[in-house]
Amino acid sequence: MSLDFTVPVASSEERTARSPMERLARAAGASFERRDGWNVAAGYGGDASVEAARITDTVGFCDRSVLTKLDIQARAEVLADLVARVAGGLELKPGRASRSPDGSTWWCPITPTRLLVLSEPRSGWDVHTALDGAASAAGEELVTIADVSCGLAALTLAGPGAGELLSRFCAIDVRPGVTPVAAFRPGSVARTPGYVLREGADRLLILVGWALGAYLWEVVADAAGHLGGGPVGTDALAAAGGGLSATAAGVAEDSADA
């Protein structure tokens, strides 16, 4: 059974989706572009070197709520077979996400019978379609696929201070020896249920409920300010490489009100 929320797709020109953090990003000086159906904060202040320095020297945080997020539930053996079919034989491991060979998608086990799939919007639609096809082959009554893209807000913390920044508002231990690259940890994030994925040595992706996206931004921005960090746009994050980064070219800056 597929449960599709109202989520924009890459080909949609009829609507523009907006992150719950957009108002705060705009107040922080973000410039926006429409990308893959979303209003995206491409950069801040027009000086790319400032954002690059945050990622390399201190810490930057970037709104990644645009990611396609699929919540899949099925019996453990059905779920493992589904992933193997769609993701080229990837195996699910407790507490550890697996990344597609092209780097566009993370497969994150929550429990043996539940999986969170994270993709860039442009590839997310193809992943969803492939999962639907594989689920149909397995018997739809055995698999539930829910698109929760507008159910979870997301921020990437990037830079040498990413772990220190997270520790200011989250008790999940992200020291490399405990939480290596690709580790996936459900837990309390800023006193609300959430998830933490270590995308790289200096990169953490955090997710919380959509309604708490603005609250998460405020918590992170306050903590980052004390560490000499600040917001960065998707262009700076993509230029830094690693993790899931925005690769789609932007179109005209939006003219609609936030």
Image (cartoon, rainbow, N blue to C red):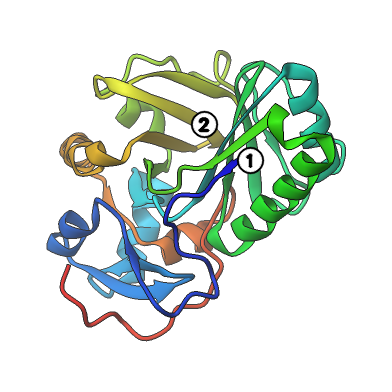
Quadrant housing residue 78: top right
Which residue is under mark 1?
Answer: 106
Q: Residue at x 51, y 77 (%)?
A: 249
Residue 113 in percent (x, y) is at 65, 19
Q: Quadrant of residue 194?
A: top left
Q: Which residue is mark 2?
A: 197
Q: Nearer the viewer, residue 157 or 57?
A: 157
Measured along the vertical axis of the image, is residue 14 above or below residue 136?
Answer: below
Q: Residue at x 55, y 13 (%)?
A: 178
Query: As rendered, which of 48 and 109 lies closer to the eye?
Result: 109
Is the residue 15 above or below the residue 180 in the image?
Answer: below
Q: Residues within 10 Å of mark 2 (few under 14, many from 20)?
A: many
Q: Viewed as shown, does residue 50 lie left or right of 75? A: left
Image quadrant holding the N terminus, namely top right
Q: Nearer the viewer, mark 1 or mark 2?
A: 1
Task: Determine the CA span between mark 1 and mark 2.
Answer: 9 Å
